Every structure is written in C-alpha cells, then in structure tokens.
Image (tube, rainbow, N blue to C red):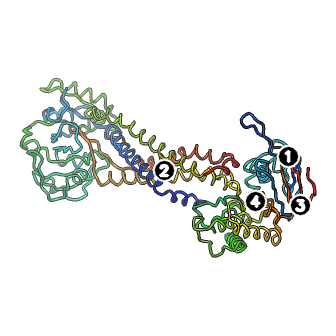
C-alpha cells in the first residue's frame, strides 16, 4: 500500500536573478513500512523533497499525498494538525527545546493529541525505553551528549505514533560511533515498529541501512536501488 | 504549554526580572498620578461639592486674608434655600503649595458633628466639646504626624490637645484638624475675635446653588466686607488653580508611563522571539498550530506586564493607604488615596499593554517561514 506519493512535484525559486529548481517534476511512491534514503550532492533538492513531504515547504506544482491526504491543499494550520497526527521529524541538529527535560521534550507532541495523561505518560515511557534513555528522562538537553540528544529527538519523532517519519541527516552532526548507534536505532524502528522512514543523508554507509536508496541530481531522481516508480 | 511559557521566561530570568521591575516602577508612578487626579476629581465633584456654598471675602485667596464678620451667618440663614450656615475660622501653616500642609478649621463643635461627614475612630465627641483646646485630627494628618488621642501638638502659635481621630468618606476632610471656633479665633497669631475666614452654607434640597450664591453676595454687599460665594467644589478648585493646572499636565506623565511599559515589554518580547525563531519553527514542525505559537508569545508578554503592573499597582496602593499623602495650597487640600478604581485601571492597563506589546512578535512567530527558520543559527 502506498503511503507517500509525489506526483510531478516541482519547486523552484529565484535567487540573485537566477532560477533554481531543487525539485523538477519529481514523482515517487513510498509504500507503508519502507525505509527510504535520499542521497545526492549538496543543493540537489534532498532536503526540499523532505520538507515538501513534511508540509513545511510548498511545491510550485504537483501533488503530494500522504496516507490519502493531499497535503498540498492544506492550509498552514491544517498542516500543523496533520503533522501532529501523521508525521515525525528528526532534525540533524536535534533541535530540542532547551528549557524542557528529555521527558518533556518527548511529551510535547503528545500534548497536541487527544490522550489522557496516563496514555501520554505511557507513550513517553515507551519511547524513552525504545531509545534507551529511561535513566535520562529528567535531564535537560545541555546535560546530554550529542548522541543522547539525537535519541531524544528520535523518541520525540515517534511518540505520537506517526504514519511516516522523516529524518534530515540524522547522523550528520555525530561522531562515527554515535552515528552507528543511531543507524541501528533507525533500523530497529523500521523493522520492529514498522515505521515508514524517509531519510536524507550524505553518507553512503548510512544510506545503506535503508531498504531503498534514491539519488537526486539537479532536482530529479536519477538512481534507485529498488526501483518501484521513479521518474 | 503554560509550563513551557513559564520556563522560557525563567530561562532568561535576569531579562525577565528587569522587565518586570521596569514595568512595576512605571505602573507605580502611573497609579500615583492617577490617585492625584482622582483626588482632584473628588474635590470638585460629589454632593458636598455641588450642594454646599463657601462664602469668602471678595478678592481674597489665602485664608489668612479673608476676614468676614461672624454675624454674617445670621443674615445668610434668613435667605431662602439656605438650610444651615457654619462660620469657620481657617488657619494654615503654609499658604503656598506644600506636601505637608496643616489646616485647622475652627467651628462650633455641635455643627461640626451635625454638618461634616466625619466619623470618630478613636476619642470622644464629649471631650472635644468640653475641652477648650481640644482638636479632632483627620486620619491622614494623624498618620503623617504620628498623632494619637491624648497627644498635644503645636504648629506655630497654635497648640492643641488631640481629643479624637476621625475618618471621612470625603478624603480631603481627613487632612483637616477641627477645633472649636472660639479657641481658634483667640489663639496666638490669629487674633480674629468676632471674625471668621468663611461661612459654609448648606442648601435645601430644591435650592438652586448659583441663585443662592448670587443672593448671598447681593445681600452682604451692604455689609462692611463684600463677599464672593461659590459652590464648594468650584471654590476648592479655584483655590488650588495653580495645582489644578499642574495636575492636569501630570496626566501626560501617566501616558508616558504606559508608553514606557509598552516599549519595555515589546523590546523584551521581540528579543525573546528573535532569539527563539528556530524553536518556534521546531514547535510548528512538530505540529503546534501558528495560532498556538501566537498565543504563547502573547502569554509571555502579558505575564511579564501583569507581574510588573500588578506589583507596581499594589505597591502604590499600599503606599497610598499607609502614607496619608496630600498636597495643599491656600488651606485647601487634595488627598492621594488608594481606590478600587486605581487597582482596576492599573490591572487593565497592564493587561492591555501586555497584549499590545506581544502582538507584533506573536505575528512574527506565527508566520515565520519554517524552512528558513530551521536553517538559521538561533
């Protein structure tokens, strides 16, 4: 079953009198439960594609459907509601809220859902356990290592049980050892929790953990290791 | 979400505390200015100000220069529309504008009890009537001078024994010291046997104050001293005309305080939001609605403003309540009193300014381009 579908998506903008087209008539289908990595040189549209799927950037043309919802037709507020229920976002620089503890950072997305406090508590504890940070629940981001911060970021992305999780270079700011731990964690999330993952990375080794590897160049998908529907 | 707002404010506690302190000081001044203006309004409005007349010597302003025959009271009583007349000898330690003006009103003790809106807090009417140098002291004066029943106190050549302390619904009354008319007429330095400073005239219900005032001046024109009769409110406002102009100008100071608070809280909120644009972008990426982000920023500015505003307002209210402040000139005084109106206006202004201060940064937080903000340093 297709969970994410891009139909002829184009995104362009003008910078310094030059028209840049990070996404050029891209079409793509991602089935539920798949782990897809996006690779390519800088400026080829990887993050633009990720942001378009997340609904935080709008394409100039084309349609994006996620779990049957055409998100390109939603307003900014509707997109926020949609993201709260359907999307988890893992940032490269973790982007935890510094005044909140690890527990509170993870709890934040659940506050936007209709859950009882007991359900909320249970979800946060499960997410903390999934990333192996139950003993760091009361720590603030400044008290955590880079890898621990990223694990909190991953727990925050999955706590609302989203249909799809996007990750923008999740290991980009980590050392090799920590990067490996995060890769293992992402694989586990995909395989054990059946979470659909779309990940942008520069690193070939990181890309290899995905079940399908896409390469973008000049706004187009030019290579796919598990070709299903690419343009 | 409220805890996030609270924690955000606490994260920059120095900045927050400075903003709250600045707001508190500004609202403190705003309330003091407001209390002066309220005092002036009370002085020139109300039943007492509209339905009582003051007969004063023509072309005289300072109480020491107005010398009317005490017997004028009988002539005034005969006029239609007049229900009672109280001859009053006024003595003040300072005819010029002062923050510690002491004003004695010498009048018949029975008439004071019957005509003036005073209520004894301590002491007895009987000892006031029986003892020649007895005085009833207004609560404001007693507080300022630390007086209590049984004390003796002297100002210039007037020495009195405190027989009671009174309160009054008319705050300016609480700046007065009442003695018997005979005592004040014969006290050293006054030397006004058979003379009084003014006559206070109470009117019947249906009397037209302006008509009665004109009639009094017309009748007394044939006497040894010509008079000017005005409503009590107009008389007091006229006596304090120099101060009235200054107080009228002071309302600009109140507006300046509001402007200061607005600038201060806006600056703090703008800085706070600018520092955290990325955080707002992250929160909206997680699923927080733009309107909710807007409400969070508005909450921050409103909390800062309300904390400071309420602190300043409460502080001003307490100070006004215990300080017994008043300003006076020419024997008339304006009392600075706390009031529910001041509390409400201080709180309301703080709330409105808090919301206004947060409006622009709230719009910024709610409409920021998420992708750009996520790529920014902050």
Q: Secondary structure at mark 3?
A: strand
Using the image, determine if residue B137 lies above or below residue A106.
above
Q: Position of residue B83 (x, y in %)?
A: 26, 38
User: Mark 3 and mark 2 in contact (Cβ < 8 Å)?
Assistant: no
* Chain ID, mark 3: A
Direction from residue B213 to residue B184 in the image, left or right? left
User: Mark 4 and mark 3 in contact (Cβ < 8 Å)?
Assistant: no
Which residue position is annotated with label 4? A167
Using a 10 Å C-alpha cutoff, classify the residue at mark 2 as few (fewer than 14 neighbours), some (14 to 19) or many (20 or more): many
**Residue shown at the point (64%, 61%) measured from the top left:** A96
Dot placed on the residue nearer the N-terminal end, 1 or 4: 1
Dot placed on the residue nearer the N-terminal end, 1 or 3: 1
Q: Residue B305, labelled with which disc? A: 2
Q: CA distance from mark 1 to mark 4?
A: 20 Å
Q: Position of residue B23 (x, y in %)?
A: 43, 49
User: Mark 1 and mark 2 in contact (Cβ < 8 Å)?
Assistant: no
Q: Are marks 2 and 1 on the same chain?
A: no
Q: Residue A9, labelled with which disc? A: 1
Q: CA distance from mark 1 to mark 3?
A: 18 Å
Direction from residue A161 to residue B35 in the image, left or right? left
Q: Nearer the viewer, residue B132 or A24?
A: A24
Q: Secondary structure at mark 2?
A: helix
Direction from residue B88 to residue B345 in the image, left or right? right
Using a 10 Å C-alpha cutoff, classify the residue at mark 3 as few (fewer than 14 neighbours), some (14 to 19) or many (20 or more): some
Q: Residue B51, labelled with which disc? A: none
The quadrant of the image that shows the N terminus of chain B is bottom right
């Amino acid at each position: 079953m297709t969970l994410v579908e891009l139909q002829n998506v184009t995104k362009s903008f003008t910078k310094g009198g030059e028209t840049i087209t990070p996404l050029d008539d891209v079409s793509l289908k991602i089935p539920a439960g798949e782990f897809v990595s996006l690779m390519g040189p800088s400026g080829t549209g990887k993050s633009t594609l990720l942001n378009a799927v997340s609904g935080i950037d709008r394409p100039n043309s084309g349609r994006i459907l996620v779990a049957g919802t055409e998100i390109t037709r939603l307003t900014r507020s509707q997109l926020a509601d949609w993201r709260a229920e359907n999307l988890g976002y893992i940032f490269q620089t973790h982007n935890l809220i510094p005044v909140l503890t690890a527990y509170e950072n993870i709890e934040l997305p659940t506050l936007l859902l209709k859950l009882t406090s007991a359900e909320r508590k249970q979800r946060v504890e499960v997410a903390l356990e999934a990333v192996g940070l139950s003993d760091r629940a009361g720590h603030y981001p400044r008290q955590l290592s880079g890898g621990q911060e990223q694990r909190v970021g991953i727990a925050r992305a999955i706590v609302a049980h989203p249909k799809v999780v996007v990750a923008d270079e999740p290991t980009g700011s980590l050392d090799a050892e920590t990067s490996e731990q995060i890769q293992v964690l992402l694989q586990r999330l995909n395989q054990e929790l059946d979470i659909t993952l779309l990940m942008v990375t520069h690193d070939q080794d990181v890309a290899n953990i995905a079940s399908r590897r896409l390469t973008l160049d000049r706004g187009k998908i030019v290579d796919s290791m598990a070709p299903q529907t690419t343009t | 979400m409220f805890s996030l707002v609270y924690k955000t404010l606490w994260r920059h506690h120095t900045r927050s505390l400075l903003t709250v302190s600045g707001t508190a000081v500004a609202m403190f001044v705003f309330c003091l200015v407001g209390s002066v203006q309220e005092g002036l309004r009370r002085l020139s409005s109300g039943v007492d100000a509209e339905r009582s007349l003051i007969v004063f010597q023509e072309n005289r302003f300072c109480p020491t220069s107005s010398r009317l025959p005490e017997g004028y009271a009988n002539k005034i009583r005969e006029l239609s529309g007049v229900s009672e007349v109280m001859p009053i000898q006024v003595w003040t330690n300072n005819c010029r504008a002062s923050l510690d003006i002491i004003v004695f009103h010498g009048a018949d003790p029975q008439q004071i009890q019957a005509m003036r809106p005073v209520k004894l807090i301590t002491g007895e009417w009987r000892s006031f009537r029986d003892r020649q140098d007895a005085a009833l002291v207004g609560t404001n004066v007693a507080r300022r001078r630390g007086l209590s029943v049984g004390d003796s106190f002297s100002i210039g050549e007037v020495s009195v024994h405190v027989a009671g302390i009174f309160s009054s619904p008319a705050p300016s009354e609480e700046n007065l010291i009442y003695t018997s008319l005979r005592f004040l007429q014969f006290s050293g330095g006054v030397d006004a046997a058979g003379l009084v400073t003014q006559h206070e005239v109470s009117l019947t219900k249906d009397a037209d104050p302006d008509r009665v005032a004109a009639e009094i001046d017309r009748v007394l024109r044939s006497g040894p001293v010509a008079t000017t009769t005005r409503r009590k409110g107009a008389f007091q406002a006229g006596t304090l005309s120099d101060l009235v102009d200054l107080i009228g100008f002071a309302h600009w100071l109140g507006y300046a305080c509001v402007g200061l608070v607005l600038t201060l809280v806006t600056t703090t909120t703008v800085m706070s939001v600018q520092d955290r644009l990325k955080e707002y972008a992250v929160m909206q990426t997680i699923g927080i609605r733009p309107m909710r982000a807007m409400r969070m920023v508005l909450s921050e500015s409103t909390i800062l403003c309300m904390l400071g505003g309420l602190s300043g307002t409460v502080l001003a209210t307490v100070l006004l309540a215990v300080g017994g402040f008043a300003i006076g000139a020419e024997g008339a005084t304006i009392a600075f009193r706390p009031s529910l109106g001041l509390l409400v206006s201080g709180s309301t202004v703080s709330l409105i300014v808090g919301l206004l201060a947060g409006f622009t940064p709230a719009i910024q937080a709610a409409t920021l381009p998420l992708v750009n903000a996520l790529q920014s340093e902050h």
